[in-house]
Amino acid sequence: MIKNYLEQLRIQRWDDHRYYHHSRINQSLHFVSALSFLFAYVWLFIDPVVSALVGWLVSMTSRQAGHFFFEPHTYDHINQATHEYKEEIKVGYNLQRKVVLMAIWALSPLVLVADPTLFGLFTPWQSATDFMRQVAKIWLVVGGGGLLFRTVHLFFIRDVETGLVWMTKILTDPFHDLMLYRKAPLALMRGELMDPGLHLNPEHTLGLIGEPTLEEQHA
């Protein structure tokens, strides 16, 4: 059972890498995101408010900017799949779902403007610092809620194992991305805009060279 769980985790990680991380800029931003997420993980036990601010303002923005602005949204010749098809079968948050999540994050501070007590949960903020700390607490809930919502959603549209594996992947992505994309900034500085070895480099393939394409898997 544990062996199968780890195998599913490896497959989800591999699919995420080869389908959605072709751009060296995106990979480099994921490296930055991983570093800041690890900082946020440590700070979660020191000051959760600081952790939330770093996690959302640095980690999530850099991570999602790579996907939205630098990752190709055209036909994927390496995996022989259209962008629309990859978005349709994506296990986690595809771009459309990410837009909703990021919109909730960006608009959530307005709740404190409308009701500084947040329905009686907070003492009304008196300064900009008070306001940001309360916003950060809301962002902690948004982050945790987004993770739990998609996990439980996957329980119903896929199965419990897929949901739990995806949650594990998301929580451990900073550690994995740090190692996987540590060389991306140097490659980018050499002028390499796209990863030329997604289907060739053993370090990237994680031993799964030769897997069927998306269309073959879901035919």
Image (cartoon, helix red, strand yellow):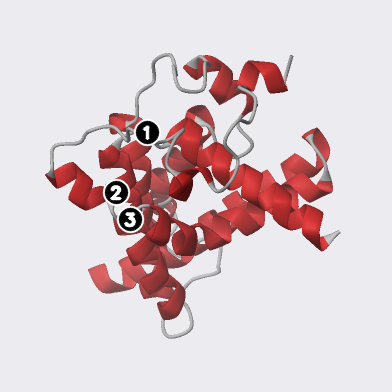
Of label 1 and label 2, which has the lower sequence position? 1
Asked whether, in this view, residue 122 is left or right of residue 186, the answer is: right
* Element assignment for label 1: loop
Is the C-beta separation of discs 1 and 3 under 8 Å?
no
Report the quarter where the N terminus lies: bottom right
In the picture, the disc for residue 22 is 1
Tell whether label 3 touches label 2 (CB within 8 Å). yes
Q: Where does residue 131 sit, x and y in percent of width and height?
A: 33, 66
* Residue 13 visible in rendering: yes
* Quadrant position of residue 37: bottom left
Question: What's the residue type where badge 1 is placed?
Answer: His
Q: Distance of mark 1 from mark 3, alpha carbons?
A: 14 Å
For label 2, the residue is 29
Q: Residue furthest left?
A: 190
218 sits left or right of 117 in the view:
right
Percent position of residue 94, x then y: 53, 32
Residue in view at x 40 percent, y 60 percent: 179
> Under tag 2, what secondary structure?
helix
Q: Residue shown at 43%/79% (left/top)?
A: 42
Q: Earlier in the sequence, mark 1 or mark 3?
A: 1
- The quadrant holding residue 34 is bottom left
Q: Which residue in the protein does label 3 denote? A: 31
What is the crowding at mark 3: few (fewer than 14 residues within 10 Å), some, or many (at least 20)? Answer: many
Question: x and y percent of residue 12 in the render?
Answer: 62, 43
Could you tell me residue 200's position as x and y percent?
A: 44, 36
Q: Gap in Å between the C-alphas at discs 2 and 3? A: 5 Å
Badge 2 amino acid: Leu
